[in-house]
Image (cartoon, rainbow, N blue to C red):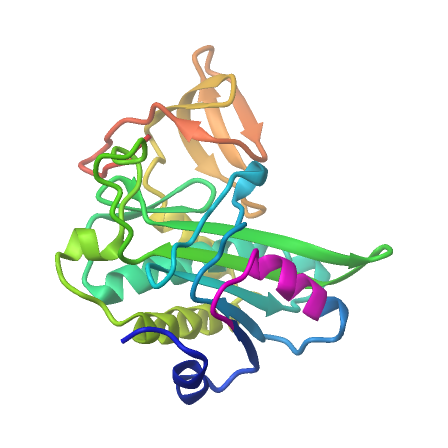
Amino acid sequence: MTLSKAIVTNRLKQPFKYYESIGSTNDVAKAWLEAGAPDRAAVIANEQTRGRGRKSRVWQTPPAAALAVSVILQPPAELIPQVNFLGALAVYDLAAEAGCSMIGIKWPNDVQVQGKKVAGILPEVVWKGSEALGVVLGLGVNVRIDFSGSELAETATSLESVLNRRLDRAELLQSLLRHVDHWYSHINEESLFRSWKSRLNMLGARIAVEDLVGSAADVLPNGSLLLRDDCGALQTVAAGDVFATFQVNGRGAGA
């Protein structure tokens, strides 16, 4: 079943805006939040032409091939960093519910299936002066994009490619938003961080993050990575791209 405004209206209970084609769901959601959008409102698109990931990377969503959703969340300001955890966990649970195996989260929030990235997650805080109005949680999930023969074939995949069967994007959308809602209800609990940490697929592995190389020793409650370098010193990494990772204890970490 393809997505449409009528189908989404019939399936969702929360406030939403639906677009057949849009530049960026995050941009629309941020403007809506500034205008007074309610907590948990969502912006949904069948096609996204100017989506973006971390470091302003392009994240395009072809028509009828993926999920492009931005959810407006308004947690207490001190809990805003937790939104990164709940976004990754919601996509992880979506993939598991669809029937995928070998799922993991590559720090900080890349959800991988069989070692390949299946989703992009981008939380963006919206400010009014020094006051945080809330967070727009952008979620892009590859459903039926075929990466074979492309430059991303070794690093990206789609749910249908993994499962080798057709999926209903309307059902996936419902599932994704249900999981966002579930984890959002736990945003003030330690279980959110513990669940995110337990699903990371690179702890204990030898990795490279930006210009640092060493072992992924641990993560902190604020989401920072502790990397033990080759001299034995612990380095705290607040953000960056993990690459050149290796398989540890049978868990694929991916590049």
State the residue in front, 136 or 63: 63
As drawn, 41 above or below 153:
below
For this view, does 190 lie left or right of residue 243? right
As drawn, 54 above or below 67:
above
As drawn, 36 above or below 156:
below
Residue most extreme to the right:
129
Counting from the top left corner in percent of width and height, residue 29 is at 63, 65
Residue most extreme to the left:
164
- Res 214 → quadrant: top left
- The span shown in magenta is 19-32
- Name the residue located 34 percent from the left edge and 35 percent from the top edge: 202
Residue 190 shows up from this direction: yes
Counting from the top left corner in percent of width and height, residue 194 is at 43, 54
As drawn, 153 above or below 139:
above
State the residue in front, 230 or 132: 132
Counting from the top left corner in percent of width and height, residue 195 is at 40, 56
State the residue in front, 180 or 141: 141
* Magenta stretch encompasses residue 45: no
Residue 195 shows up from this direction: no
Quadrant, the C terminus? top left
- Name the residue located 74 percent from the left edge and 75 percent from the top edge: 36
